[in-house]
Amino acid sequence: MNERRNPDTDLRSGGTEFAATSAVAAQRAVAHRGPPFWFLRLLIAYLVSRVLVAGAVAIAIYLVPKSVEYYFERWDSFWYLRVTEYGYPVEIYEAVPGYRGNEIAFFPAFPMLVRAVAWPLGGREVLAAYLVNFVLGFALLVIMRLLFARLVEERMADRAVLLFTFFPGTAVFSLPYAEPLALTAAALCLYFLMSQRWVLAGLIGAVATASKPNMLPLVLACAAAAIFVIWQRKDWLALAAPTLSSCGILTFFAYLQWQTGDFLAWFHHEDVMWNTERDFGLHLAGEIMAGLTSLDFDTTPGVLLKLGGAIVAIVGLATLIRLRPPPAVLLFCMGVLAMALLNSGDIGTRPRFVAAAFPLFLGVATVLGPRLLRTAVAVSAFLLFATTGLYMGGTTVP
């Protein structure tokens, strides 16, 4: 049985049909001698966003002069680079000196990729990490645009990706964080699901689930797509998608079993060393209320970012539901947001965790006219610049 039965048919699970006109089909069939115009516009927007981030970092270094290592290894960058260099410890509860936890909290796909790229660079792991994420950041935008163009008209897809490009949560794309790899793999997995290329969707999904724990909803998305296709036409090959996509996180847990003797070492480490509490959003609500009533320079910026992230998440999810996307896309978004709220004290609606549910921006784009879109992009660009400065020069956690 072929993996992709009809190359021109998208997966429209749940009976949802998106209008596909012959004009759009003809547009996509045109062969370009060079990159399409949307690609060039996207590249310019991405470069502008990275210039904003670099400018904010430069100002932070000027205002808060510290060592180069301090800025290159800020926040979780330290941990991902440490995993790249040293791997994982044998002891689950042995903290790195000066810190409250160890490397077990951080998934392995990004450090493995950095180590592979660092080898031809003479082992320069920091350089490799920044180069990898610079390339992956743009690759994510391209794949997002291709995915969105399968769900809505191309003009709307362009708007959605533009909004995402300047969203403050993308600030970490210029740091050694796993988000660029995780989201690029997630977007590509959803794209292959829409194309009914089950094995490719599963393999790429495995990269995502081996990159970040909040990519686990991809398995649910793959399962939903597979169940629909099996029920509709008995295409049992669809089971490859959820099966393979779950192998990323399961392989990491199997490695931890071999390394530490505990298959659930990640959970136990999170609970004990990082004081993880499952509060289902209650802590986030209390933190926002307290932060708004007692203003403080150290905590208020983070609270405002979480409040803004919550607003984007609510509006984005409501407008995305109104679009009636394929259930796989909707379940992925809802799952990512649910996991953020599950541990809202430590994660919550910080911008980078809202950005992980990237199809939300497709919903937001559909309710913004051209003037509102320009205003939203301008405000987002300013916030991207400001939040990067807070992350690098202040105490606000990305």
Image (spheres, helix red, strand yellow):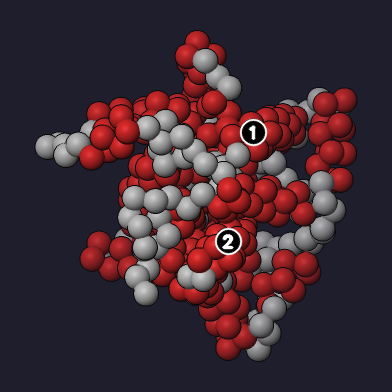
Q: Which residue is mark 1?
A: 322
What mark, if any, has residue 228 been given in the picture?
Answer: 2
Above or below — where is 237 with respect to 90? above
Query: Residue 156: x percent and y percent?
Result: 45, 28
| Residue at point 43%, 50% (across, down) | 10
Q: Mark 2 near mark 1, Cβ–Cβ under 8 Å?
A: no
Q: Amino acid at mark 2?
A: Phe
| Camera-nearest residue between 68 and 183 | 183
Describe the element under mark 2 as helix, strand or loop: helix
Query: Residue 29: x percent and y percent?
Result: 23, 40
Can the viewer see residue 3? Answer: yes
Count neighbours of disc 1 (C-alpha within 10 A) and say few if under 14, some if 14 to 19, many if 20 or more.
few
Q: Amino acid at mark 1?
A: Arg
- Quadrant location of residue 200? bottom left
Above or below — where is 353 with respect to 111? above
Describe the element under mark 1 as helix, strand or loop: helix
Kindly give the residue lying farthest to the front in the view shown.
233
Q: With 35 as the anchor, is 84 left or right in this view?
A: right
| Residue at point 40%, 26% (across, down) | 155
Above or below — where is 190 with respect to 233? above
Q: With 188 as the anchor, is 347 left or right in this view?
A: right
| Camera-nearest residue between 183 and 54 | 183
Can the viewer see residue 176? Answer: no
| Camera-nearest residue between 79 and 36 | 36
Query: Residue 222: x percent and y percent?
Result: 55, 62
Instruction: Tell me how far mark 2 sits from mark 1, CA to CA.
Output: 21 Å
Q: Number of marks in the image?
A: 2
